Image: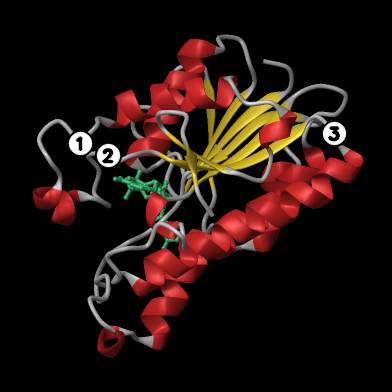
Amino acid sequence: MDGAIAVIGAGGAIGGALTRALAGRYPGAALHAFARRVPGSPVAGAAHHSLADYVDEDAMARAAGMAEAWGLVIVATGILHGPGLRPEKALRDISGPALARVLAANTVAPALAAKHFVPRLARGRRAVFAALSARVGSISDNRLGGWYAYRASKAALNMVLKTASIEAARRNPGAIIVGLHPGTVDSPLSRPFQGAVPDGGLRTPDAAAAALLDVLDGLTPADTGRCFAWDGQEVPP
Ligand SMILES: NC(=O)c1ccc[n+]([C@@H]2O[C@H](COP(=O)([O-])OP(=O)(O)OC[C@H]3O[C@@H](n4cnc5c(N)ncnc54)[C@H](OP(=O)(O)O)[C@@H]3O)[C@@H](O)[C@H]2O)c1
């Protein structure tokens, strides 16, 4: 790996698994893991940093300044439910404050990460900025409805990534900026909804992380601006 590696949201199930997988795949690389809390069992080979809040722009700028050039940056933050927050079934369930919370975690945080990390992607070689999105952020693939805030936040994230890819390509032709759909992964985020998952459809965070890193390894600058699932298939806009 040319350039340093960052995982933003390393305290999550997939973010943690990505950090472990990256430490194994690129031993010796400068691997920085950012989370709101430094873990009790740090990943060997990773430098752990606490980032009080993913929407604190000064903190994000300081994080991006920790390396001269980044070879790979993955943003793994995101929320779907939580205290006082449930995915909407119908228009009547929409709440302004809840929508704002979901947009902050799923769109604003990765957008601020893009603002500060993309200009520091390594130049003259392949360098990747990826954010965990979701298939339900696909507008053309929306057949079931519901989940207004989550769907809207991921669709908006995909647009941020696409727009950043156009801007970055002008200055850094080796930059690859993509969204990633990890599949349905066993994590606190998916736990209340796992009943609807068909047998064999739920992946472990470690399996998802390995698949996502394989997908990233296969991308070229021609793929920038798009969103890819864990199996390498493109998620349509
Ligand atoms: N699990 C799935 O089935 C699935 C499916 C499709 C897409 N995804 C996407 O994959 C990503 C990771 O999900 P996960 O399954 O690993 O979930 P998770 O274990 O619940 O991790 C959530 C991540 O989001 C961060 N986070 C939590 N609350 C936040 C807030 N209010 N503002 C900003 N960040 C916040 C956490 O930060 P800390 O690291 O600081 O704790 C953690 O990194 C999300 O973007 C999710 O939408 C997951």
Residues under labels 2 and 3: Cα distance?
33 Å
Mark on residue 202? 1
User: In which quadrant of the rendered view does residue 119 lie?
Assistant: top right
Q: Secondary structure at mark 3?
A: loop
The yes-or-no answer for disc 2 within 8 Å of ligand 1 is: yes
Sooner in the amino-acid sequence: mark 2 or mark 3: 3
Does 188 sit above or below residue 207? below
Image quarter where the C terminus lies is bottom right
- Dot 1 and dot 3 residues touching (CB under 8 Å): no
Q: Secondary structure at mark 1?
A: loop
Residue named by callout 3: 173
Query: Looking at the image, which residue is at 27% across and 76% down?
Result: 88
**Is 56 positioned to the left or the right of 2 in the image?**
left
Q: Where residue 84 sits: x, y (%)?
A: 25, 76
Residues under labels 1 and 2: Cα distance?
5 Å
Pick the front one: 58 or 12: 12
Residue named by callout 2: 185
Which color scheme did the rendering employ for the protein?
secondary structure
Q: Where residue 56 sits: x, y (%)?
A: 61, 63
Q: Residue furthest bottom?
A: 92
- Dot 1 and dot 2 residues touching (CB under 8 Å): yes
**Is 128 positioned to the left or the right of 49 in the image?**
right
The yes-or-no answer for disc 1 within 8 Å of ligand 1 is: yes
Q: Where residue 135 sits: x, y (%)?
A: 40, 50
